[in-house]
Image (cartoon, grey):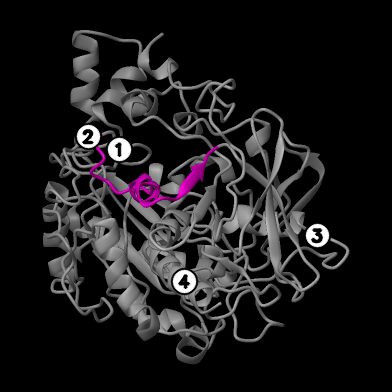
Amino acid sequence: MSGAESVGKEGDGSGSAAGDAVDRTPVPDADVCVVGAGPAGALVADRLAADHDVVVLDAGPRFDPADRLARQERAIRPFYDRPDVWDVGGERDAHENAGERFYPLNHARVKGIGGSTLHWQGMVMRLHEDDFKSGTARGVGPDWPIDYADLRPYYAEAERELGVAGGSGIDNPHAPPREEPHPMPPFEPSYSDSLFADACEELGIDMHSVPNARNSEPYDDRSPCVGYGTCQPVCPSGAKYDATVHVERAEARGATVIDRASVQRLDHSDDDSVTAAVYATPAGEEHRQEADAFVVAAGGVETPRLLLSSASDRYPDGLANASGHVGEFFMDHLFAGAGGTLDEPTRQNHVGFYTSACDQFYDEADATQAPFKLEFFNYAGPSPVEMALSGDDWGDPLAERLRDGYGNHVAMGGLVEQLPDAESRVTLADDRTDDHGNPVPQIEWTVGDRALDTIERANEIQVEILEELGADVEWVAGPDATGPAYHHMGTTRMSDDPDRGVVDADCLTHDLTNCWIASSSVFPTSGAMNPTLTIAALALRVADDVDARLSAA
């Protein structure tokens, strides 16, 4: 077998042999059960493991770090689609669509220890102050029950935990206030950034560095970035943060992490507390993991699915769903982009992640224009490897094709906020089940006019910059061609009012006395910044609240 063929069985989601000898029996006398070993679950487990007996259950496998080079090889081969890199697909990962727009859920998710951070690009911005008070400041959407000041110290801690390379707000006058520098200096601008800079200066448009959860220098016993350029969907070097860092740290502190333990439902008592997470193993066994406290950290799709699947006589509409809002207000960020070619080299695909952005227009947001950010891509167009592997020519013909078609592409991207809408939601499918016989998630994704109009505004600025640069603009991803950024948010929203949300300001469910949700699913609004740093900050805050309540009991 080649390296790309030796990593698991494509599409089965296994990641390891079905006959492994891992002990997946419940942990007796556990204090805390965490469902999900992505960034939120890993941070919660690590934070609590020193003082409490913690068990983490995850539906996916442990991926051997030694396989990452083979996964990288799979990633760059045109034969493989992106889900193949991390063994996504099959009955385990089945889903349905019923909304006005198709949502390609499996294109960018990973089930396994480390979760979405195994394949993410690694951008980690803070939400802006007005993102927490959209209704008051912008006249549209709800306010969060917490504000930027509440999360500010946790943002700083999350940056230290993940290891963030950034400009500390010095080169970005549009960033929210901060209290200390980023842990590492920012990455140097790419070559194509310097080309963009000249055009932006002429137009009076600001460029600034991008906070990255990847090492610009040695940090936390991990190497600096070595430039593989395949950050999304796999970093072989470990320079880009992924949640296995905190999973391993939690285990070193005494936590138990059980992989391929698919939680089927949460059981509860008559006094409105969760008593056990019922999970299935690859051997077909079903176990009950009991604990004093439960933290659901399964992401914006699987979290509402689990709660809805836990319906009982006491909670016929699903667990934690007295408000009826579990699964509603599903949000994502919308993509806006434009690109083309220049009559000069751009050194495309030499980095693998973008190093400059523009937040200048972000806080112009109001009831009609959504917040948006702009991104200056240095990975536009195909890489030489992609071009070589996608043709059937060799020798001089291949060299000529590479010479004529590579190295002069340039592009911009951007993210736009989607407002919460109750009709945009995650429910349970009526007639499709997964490999355990449970209804799969059904996504009804609805996008409003405010977001679509803002995409047009972002496109106007992008095209203006590209034309000032002297590029031939060859494509525009506008309202009709937009797609998701795969940031699942809003499906168990946070609210002070139990009738308007699923969790309170501490992310404790309104209906259950011992069940917290650590996920972007609690976001009342999405802003237009990548959500992982906010997920991490909220997870650390959840862990502190769980610890305080357990210690006081």
Structural distance between the alpha carbons of marks 3 and 1? 39 Å
Whichever of callouts 1 and 2 sits on the residue coming sooner in the sequence is 2
Tag 4: amino acid: Asp
Report the front residue among 194 and 39: 39
Whichever of callouts 4 and 2 sits on the residue coming sooner in the sequence is 2
Instruction: Identify the image quadrant of the C terminus.
Output: bottom right
* Displayed quadrant of residue 465: bottom left
Structural distance between the alpha carbons of marks 1 and 2? 7 Å
Which residue of the protein is positioned furthest toward the front in this rendering? 29
Residue 523 seen anywhere in this rendered image of the structure: yes
Tag 2: amino acid: Tyr
Could you say which disc has been placed on residue 547 in the image?
A: 4
Q: SS class of the residue under badge 3? A: loop
Whichever of callouts 3 and 1 sits on the residue coming sooner in the sequence is 1
Structural distance between the alpha carbons of marks 3 and 2? 46 Å
Nearest to viewer (mark 1 / mark 2): 1
Q: Residue at x 62, y 70 (%)?
A: 514
Tag 1: amino acid: Cys
User: Which residue is under mark 3?
Assistant: 311
Whichever of callouts 3 and 2 sits on the residue coming sooner in the sequence is 2
Q: SS class of the residue under badge 2? A: loop
Nearest to viewer (mark 4 / mark 2): 4
Which residue of the protein is positioned furthest toward the right in this rendering? 313
* Magenta stretch encompasses residue 247: yes
Structural distance between the alpha carbons of marks 3 and 4? 28 Å
Q: Are marks 3 and 1 in contact (CB under 8 Å)?
A: no
Tag 3: amino acid: Ala
Crowd tier of the residue under label 3, counting other residues whose Cα lies within 10 Å: few below 14, some 14–19, many 20 or above:
some
Report the front residue among 266 and 14: 266
User: Which residue is under mark 1?
Assistant: 235
Boundaries of the magenta span: 237-259
Report the front residue among 122 and 510: 510
